[in-house]
Image (cartoon, helix red, strand yellow):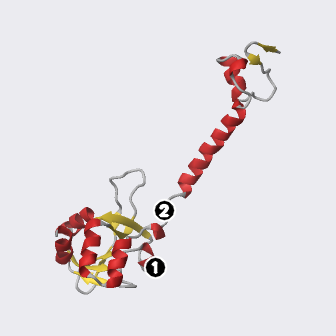
Amino acid sequence: MEDSRGPQSSPGLARPGPAAFVRAAFVPAAFVPAAFDSCAAEYAGLMASKKAKSAKSKPAPEDFRSDALAHALEKQDIAAVALALRHGTTVVPLVKPGARDNPLDSGEVWTYRDPKTGDLALLLFSDAKNKPANLPPGVGIYTADWLRKFLAAHPITTVFLDIAGPHPMQASPDEILKALDA
């Protein structure tokens, strides 16, 4: 049975597609193209694939890197390291990553405490690939402002940059703070 509103469905038959619903409820059949059903299905598929991609597109730890810091450490250029830290980012190991849905939760930073002296060291990396495997798997990427606040708030005695190589450096927190404030 068909009237000016388009095809009608009866109980027990397959559910009509979106075009039939639009035709039956709102718009005369002449104004709804037949391709509407396929467009609606394509759109639904697109949205489902976007959700799947967003779940898969979480950055891998290997995607975290600071090219400027890596180049400065390679040259062992203290001024370039200072510049890279001041204007770039650095990779930091995390005990516990922050909650993805809370931008204020930056995670819990992993530090090393020397069992003999109790000294606390902060490890910074130019690339997540340079982080030793025996450290916690989580990493975060942080700015100079974060580094300045972290060093001011914690009793860090030394800072290691790319401790496992390929081009390690070591500095005191005071030297790092001077470099950040220069």
User: Where is residue 175 shown, x and y percent of the image?
Assistant: 18, 77
Q: In the rendered structure, find residue 153 and report the number of the disc placed on it.
A: none
In space, the residues marked 1 and 2 are separated at their CA atoms by 18 Å
User: Where is residue 10 shown, x and y percent of the image?
Assistant: 80, 20
Under mark 2, the amino acid is Pro
Is residue 25 placed above or below 78 in the rendered structure? above
- Of 154 and 39, the residue lying toward us: 39
Q: In the rendered structure, find residue 59 and report the number of the disc placed on it.
A: 2
Q: Is residue 99 left or right of residue 49?
A: left
Q: Is residue 32 left or right of residue 47?
A: right
The residue tagged 1 is 133
User: Where is residue 109 shown, x and y percent of the image?
Assistant: 33, 68
Is residue 116 placed above or below 84 in the rendered structure? below
Res 172 quadrant in image: bottom left
- Pick out the residue farthest to the bottom: 116
Q: Residue at x 34, y 59 (%)?
A: 106
Report the quarter where the C terminus lies.
bottom left
Q: Are marks 1 and 2 in contact (CB under 8 Å)?
A: no
SS at mark 2?
A: loop
**Can the viewer see residue 168?**
no
First along the sequence among labels 1 and 2? 2
Mark toward the viewer: 1 or 2: 2
Res 140 quadrant in image: bottom left
Report the quarter where the N terminus lies.
top right
Q: Residue at x 29, y 80 (%)?
A: 160
Q: Residue at x 49, y 66 (%)?
A: 60
